[in-house]
Image (cartoon, grey):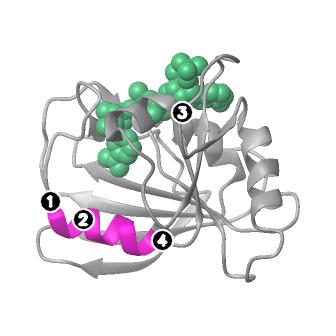
Amino acid sequence: MTTPTGRRVTLVAAVAENGVIGSDADIPWKISEDFAHFKATTLGHVLVMGRTTHEGIGRPLPGRTTIVLTRDPEWTADGVRIAHSITEALDLADELLRDQPADRQVMIGGGAHVYAAAMPYADEQILSEIPLAPAGDTHYPEFSEKRWREVRREDRGKFAVVWWERVFACGAA
Ligand SMILES: NC(=O)c1ccc[n+]([C@@H]2O[C@H](COP(=O)([O-])OP(=O)(O)OC[C@H]3O[C@@H](n4cnc5c(N)ncnc54)[C@H](OP(=O)(O)O)[C@@H]3O)[C@@H](O)[C@H]2O)c1
């Protein structure tokens, strides 16, 4: 689907077997290799995340330009850009990437609300499959395997990374 000026949009998430991605505003596992994978995947790109996820992390992640989504017109935070809708975030990402190399893209870093809002605009999902089934209050949005195709899978030992590409663009995830 891409942004208005053609930058790729990629969802990056770690998802447990039961679909859980979060619990009490945190991620209910600590797998340093997956955090390293997230860092390597998002470094140098524009990273879009929800206010809850940003506040859970507590600081802007270095080496990335962070756009935080909030509907609160008063909300501010140091070191991040702010958008009030997903389309505003994608427009802002385009502006931030205007003079950047063509391979710089928009990475969607969660949480569930933001993955769901961005899914219709996404070209790709990079999902870490976490072989756990923890209790949690936040789940990755469901998506149709008719509209998304697994194109690559890598075993990373404690988890697997799976790349999904959109099969056809119909405006819905
Ligand atoms: N496993 C993973 O890969 C992963 C990755 C990221 C996060 N997480 C986990 O996910 C959980 C947080 O997810 P969440 O779904 O509760 O929260 P979230 O998506 O991080 O943030 C939700 C907030 O973002 C804003 N927002 C969301 N969609 C918006 C839209 N379309 N337009 C404008 N603003 C929008 C709203 O902020 P306002 O209320 O300020 O209006 C909303 O309350 C945490 O447990 C976190 O640790 C897991």
Give yes or no for residue 128 being in the magenta stretch.
no
Task: Write down the region rendered in magenta.
Answer: 31-41
User: In the image, is 28 to the left or to the right of 94?
Assistant: left
Q: Nearer the viewer, residue 142 or 122?
A: 122
**Mark 1: secondary structure:** loop
Q: Is residue 147 above or below residue 164?
A: above
Task: Point out which mark residue 77 bears.
Answer: 3
Quick check: is the Cβ at mark 2 less than 8 Å away from ligand 1? no
Q: Which residue is mark 4?
A: 43
Q: Residue at x 35, y 78 (%)?
A: 153
Which of the marked residues, 4 or 2, is nearer the chain's N terminus? 2
User: Label 2, on which residue?
Assistant: 34
Q: CA distance from mark 3 to mark 4?
A: 20 Å
Three-letter residue code for mark 1? Ile
Alpha carbon distance from label 3 to label 1? 28 Å
Residue 94 in picture, x, y percent from top left: 80, 60
Q: Closer to the camera: disc 4 or disc 1?
A: 4
Measuring from the top left, give residue 20's x and y in whole percent. 27, 38
- Figure check: 138 above or below 18: above
Q: Main secondary structure of the magenta part?
A: helix
Q: Are marks 4 and 1 in contact (CB under 8 Å)?
A: no
Label drawn at residue 31:
1
Tell me the kind of residue under disc 4.
Leu
- Is 140 situated left or right of 75 in this image? left
How many neighbours does mark 4 have within 10 angstroms: few (below 14), some (14-19), or many (20 or more)?
A: some
Label 4 sits on a secondary structure element that is loop
Q: Looking at numbered disc 3 in the image, what kind of residue is underneath it?
A: Ala
Marks 3 and 4 in Cβ contact (< 8 Å)? no
Label 3 element class: loop
Q: Residues within 10 Å of mark 1 (few under 14, many from 20)?
A: few
| 66 relative to 21, above or below | below
Residue 14 seen anywhere in this rendered image of the structure: yes
